[in-house]
Every structure is written in structure tokens, then in C-alpha cells.
């Protein structure tokens, strides 16, 4: 596991929407905006078992996640990593936690809660600018 670069910890701790890049099963890249939580060692994302992103990572667990500083778009942190595991979240509890982190104090579980999972990512490297 790689350590977060000194001076960029704030990008991991702040509620900034980042971009998750995966490799589709047909070999094409795919990038989408995502909420996340940094736990000091890795990233956690909420997702469902029905969407392509999880299928992409199950087929090829490599990913890149980029967080751009909203106050300086030329400052960013790229987290390169691997999907370590997928945890079931059938109540949508982690979705609610992330919703509150991102400013919705009244966040409730989503309609697709029964299909929710938490994707746990281990960093293998970082890039900065």
C-alpha cells in the first residue's frame, strides 16, 4: 500500500467529487464522477451491483481516481489503486454517510439500497501536480 503524498492530504479529506476511471470489459476506458471517503489507508465508494463500473472492476481491478482542487484546478491528486474487496450494504448506510459528508444533512437511503455495495480500494501509487 502506498502512502498519501505529503501536502495533498486535504484533497483526500475534503468532500470533493472525484473522477473514477476504470477499464471497460471491451478494453475502452470509462470515467465517472464519484463521492468517496478516505479512511487514512484507502478509498471507499458506494455503488450498486447493477452498474457497469463494478463489472469493470470485477473484470480488471485496476483503477485511477483523480481529485482536482476546486480552488486551484491545476492542483490535483491521482490515486492509482486496486479494488481490494466489495462489501454488501443492503440498507444503503454508506450512501447515507456519504450524502451527509457531501452536504445533505437529511440524506436518506436510495431507492436501490438493496443492491448497494461499498467498493474498498487499496492505493498502489499516487500522482500529483
Image (cartoon, rainbow, N blue to C red):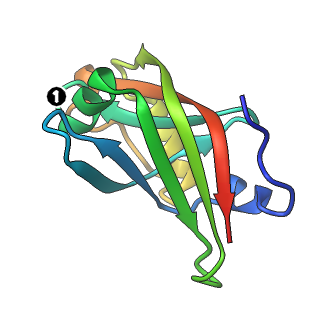
Examine the rendering and report whether any part of residue 99 can be seen.
no
Q: Left or right: 108 with respect to 29? A: right
How far from the left and from the top, in percent, is residue 25? 17, 33
Residue furthest toward the front?
A: 27
Q: Is residue 34 above or below residue 53?
A: below
Q: Is residue 82 above or below residue 20?
A: above
How far from the left and from the top, in percent, is residue 7? 85, 63
How far from the left and from the top, in percent, is residue 114? 25, 20
State the quadrant of the C terminus: bottom right
How far from the left and from the top, in percent, is residue 80? 56, 44
Query: Residue visible at 40% across and 27% down?
Result: 61
Query: Residue visible at 28% across and 38% down?
Result: 110
Query: Residue visible at 64% across and 84% down?
Result: 72
Q: Can you identify the residue that label 1 sits on?
A: 50
State the quadrant of the N terminus: top right
Q: Is residue 68 above or below residue 114?
A: below
Q: Is residue 115 above or below residue 35?
A: above
Which image quadrant for residue 54?
A: top left
Which is more toward the observer, 91 or 22?
22
Examine the rendering and report whether any part of residue 21 can be seen.
yes
Q: Left or right: 108 with respect to 40? A: left
- Total of numbered circles in the picture? 1
Which image quadrant for residue 75?
A: bottom right
Badge 1, how many Cα within 10 Å: few under 14, some, many 20+? few
Which image quadrant for residue 32?
A: bottom left
Amino acid at each position: 500500500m502506498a502512502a498519501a503524498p505529503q501536502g495533498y492530504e486535504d484533497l483526500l479529506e475534503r468532500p470533493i467529487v472525484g473522477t473514477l476511471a476504470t477499464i471497460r470489459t471491451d478494453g475502452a476506458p470509462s470515467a465517472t464522477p464519484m463521492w468517496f471517503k478516505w479512511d487514512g489507508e484507502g478509498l471507499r465508494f458506494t455503488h450498486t451491483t447493477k452498474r457497469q463500473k463494478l463489472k469493470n472492476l470485477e473484470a480488471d481491478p485496476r483503477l485511477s481516481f483523480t481529485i482536482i482542487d476546486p480552488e486551484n484546478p491545476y492542483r490535483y491528486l491521482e490515486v492509482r489503486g486496486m479494488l481490494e474487496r466489495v462489501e454488501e450494504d443492503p440498507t444503503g448506510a454508506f450512501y447515507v454517510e456519504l450524502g451527509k459528508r457531501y452536504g445533505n444533512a437529511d440524506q436518506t437511503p436510495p431507492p436501490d439500497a438493496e443492491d448497494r455495495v461499498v467498493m474498498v480500494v487499496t492505493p498502489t501509487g499516487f500522482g500529483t501536480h
